[in-house]
Amino acid sequence: MEITKLFFITYFAALLGVLPPGLVNMSVAKTCVHRGMRNGVLVAIGASVVVMIQAFFAVLLARYIFSNEAVRNTLFRTGIVIFGILAVYFFIKAKKNKVKEVKIPKHSGRRSFWKGVFVATINVLPLPYFCAISAALNITSKGQAGILEVGLFVLAAAAGTFTSLYVYVVGFNRIQHEPRNFAKYSNYFMAGLMIILVLITLFRM
């Protein structure tokens, strides 16, 4: 019963953590609009694979990070730099962006998968988030019971993340008939989002 609770608590925590607009889910949305539902799903899968790795390391680092303020702040500073660079990138891209007809390519699956991997990798905020969940659930990696807990924690984190991202895929797939309007404003939205993430990270520090 405790194992079941661990899975569902982690699952819904991951789902709700990814549900608000963020770097990963908005990248999924953009891909879905510009390249079709299939590629949006592949970005979501790529991101979920990285979340599995992040959740695993979060369990291993949970106690160390929360007992070492310097390490925690280093993670946050890294996030600030990354989000700041991305904010400038999306703003410049939005300024140069010309609204044009969007053509959905037929064969770009591998590229979409690795895009999901890349975007999720540079998004460092899930690490302290999963560390907090791991610490709250008191998950260890010692013994057979600990290994089972870690495995379920990792699977639940990935499953919850994918479920949330799939909601974005389905939702944004319905506006494919007007991708030009989405393309016009999405880069401005992403630039603004990066600035918000910088402010949130500064606050959390």
Image (spheres, rainbow, N blue to C red):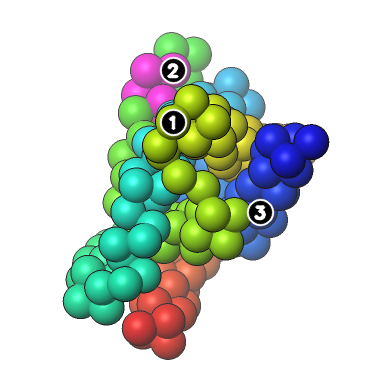
Closer-to-camera residue (162/128): 128
Stretch in magenta: 109-113
Query: Which of the marked residues, 1 or 3, is nearer the chain's N terminus?
Result: 3
Lateral position of residue 76 relative to residue 184, left or right: left
Closer-to-camera residue (64/128): 64
State whether residue 23 appears in this view. no
Q: Nearer the viewer, mark 2 or mark 1?
A: 1
**Quadrant (top left/top right/bottom left/bottom right) for the C terminus:** bottom left
| Tag 3 and tag 2, C-beta contact below 8 Å | no
Magenta part, dominant SS:
helix
Query: Which of the marked residues, 2 or 1, is nearer the chain's N terminus?
Result: 2
Q: Residue at x 63, y 27 (%)?
A: 37
Kind of residue indicated by mark 1:
Gly
Residue 129 locus on image (x, y percent): 49, 61
State whether residue 68 appears in this view. yes
Q: CA distance from mark 1 to mark 3?
A: 25 Å
Q: Residues within 10 Å of mark 1 (few under 14, many from 20)?
A: few
Kind of residue indicated by mark 3:
Ala
User: Is residue 139 placed above or below 50 in the rendered structure?
Assistant: below
Q: Residue at x 59, y 54 (%)?
A: 137
Q: Nearer the viewer, mark 1 or mark 3?
A: 1
Q: CA distance from mark 3 to mark 2?
A: 29 Å
Magenta segment includes 111 = yes
Q: Which residue was labeled with disc 3?
A: 13
Q: Which residue was labeled with disc 1?
A: 143
Residue 117 locus on image (x, y percent): 36, 35
| Tag 2 and tag 1, C-beta contact below 8 Å | no
Kind of residue indicated by mark 2:
Gly
| Tag 1 and tag 3, C-beta contact below 8 Å | no
Q: Helix, strand or loop at disc 1?
A: helix
Residue 109 image label = 2
**Quadrant (top left/top right/bottom left/bottom right) for the N terminus:** top right
